[in-house]
Amino acid sequence: MHQRVHSDVARLVLPLSKVPAGTTIRIEHVGDCPAMRSRLLALGLTPGSTARVDSCGCGQCCLCVRGGQLAIGHGMADKIMVRVLDADDAVPDHDRPGRVCCALRHCGR
């Protein structure tokens, strides 16, 4: 279930915690705390990568990123800045050399 996002909204950079489920995003910035940033980068949340938000509630955000699923706490999600992508603008990571992701049609979820 992919939501079509208005083109003005697609240009906004906002915290991951504010993105509705079913939205495809591109990671723009991953926190300023070195320990948190290191952990999130190790989990595959790198600037420029795409992901699909499976759910994002008060407790945690669940993402499909680089071929796997990941759940992070709401506090961390507040510190990850993302860009919401239109279906036409989204380029899944599996179309980029050396990257694998299920963010769009690749895994059929």
Image (tube, rainbow, N blue to C red):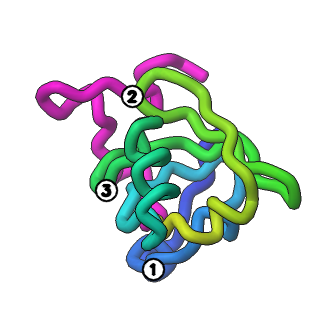
Left or right for 85, reference 5: left
Q: Nearer the viewer, residue 45 or 64?
A: 45
Q: Which circle marks residue 47 in the picture?
A: 3
Which quadrant of the view contains residue 106? top left
Res. 101 mark:
2
Looking at the image, is mark 3 or mark 1 nearer the viewer? Answer: 3
Residue 81 screen position, x and y as percent: 48, 69
Q: Amino acid at mark 1?
A: Leu
Query: Which dot, 3 or 2, sits closer to the camera?
Result: 3
Circle 2/circle 1 CB separation < 8 Å: no
Q: CA distance from mark 3 to mark 1?
A: 15 Å
Name the residue carrying label 1: 12
Residue 38 in percent (x, y) is at 40, 50
User: Considering only vertical position in the picture, is 35 above or below 101?
Assistant: below
Q: Residue at x 45, y 79 (%)?
A: 12
Magenta stretch holds residue 104 = yes
Residue 55 visible to the viewer: yes
Q: Is residue 47 magenta?
A: no
Residue displayed at 45% across by 26% down: 102
Q: Is residue 86 visible in this depiction of the protein?
A: no
